[in-house]
Image (cartoon, helix red, strand yellow):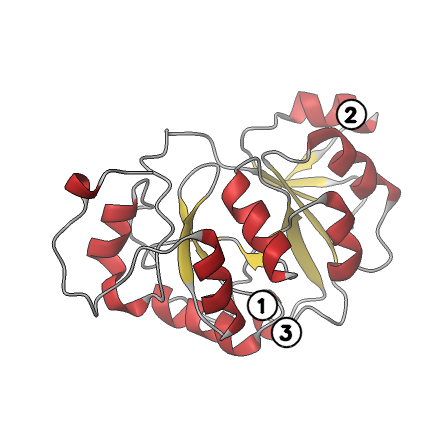
Amino acid sequence: MASDAKRPSLPAEAVTYVTVSEAVSALRSSGVVAIPTDTVYGLAASAFDERAIARVYEIKGRDFDVALPVLLADAEDMERCAVSIPDLARGLAGRFWPGPLTIVVPKSNSMPDVLTAGMSTVGLRVPHHPVPRELSRLLGSPLTGTSANRSGMPSMRSASAVILELGSLLDGVVDGGDLLEAEPSTVVDVMVDPPRILRSGAVSAEELADAAGIEFSTA
């Protein structure tokens, strides 16, 4: 945890540093909290809660026609979020989760349309970082996995930077210290043939091909 000396002096009503347990309580009341992830701080809300998801969009100032990715506690949680899951998706999850690979699969009815921008698919990932996984596990729900920043602004790697940028818009911040710079997750769509890399990232095309036994196209 970052030391208190590094924290900005802000009014108490602006934002509160919270534990994971306190964050769970906030999310159960349709709250939105900032949490550390594998790369940057993210905005966490229950991915089953339409009201909370709408708040995420409002906090970011993001258009509702851009879908949000989803973070899971474990690979088994994919069954709650997706249907007709291709064998390729299961194989990639087994190889690269937890880790920097987001897999686009057919969404289940439990995934609100506001989360997926009305699309029939959803992007899922199990992160390495223990905070989002434990938060999801205790909440009993997958989480939104978008960065904690205003749309078009730089992503942030410290809790203090999130507070200065978003302040009272949040219901709390889980302080995970300063995060090291890291590549974003690779995003793949397994619903097309051949499967497609939608965003290049930490998992290379060569690693994907080796795991799947087939070549991936690029967007």
The N terminus: image quadrant: top left
Q: Position of residue 109 (x, y in %)?
A: 76, 72
Q: Which residue is mark 2?
A: 211
Q: Are marks 1 and 3 in contact (CB under 8 Å)?
A: yes
Label 1, label 3: how far apart the Cα atoms are = 5 Å
Q: Position of residue 98 (x, y in %)?
A: 65, 35
Q: Which residue is mark 1?
A: 115
Q: Position of residue 203 (x, y in %)?
A: 61, 28
Image side of residue 96 versus residue 211, left or right: left
The three-letter code of the residue at mark 1 reads Leu
Where disc 2 sits, the SS reads: helix
Residue plotted at (46% across, 31% down):
183
Where disc 1 sits, the SS reads: helix
The three-letter code of the residue at mark 2 reads Ala
Q: Position of residue 86 (x, y in %)?
A: 85, 47
The three-letter code of the residue at mark 3 reads Asp
Q: Which residue is mark 3?
A: 113
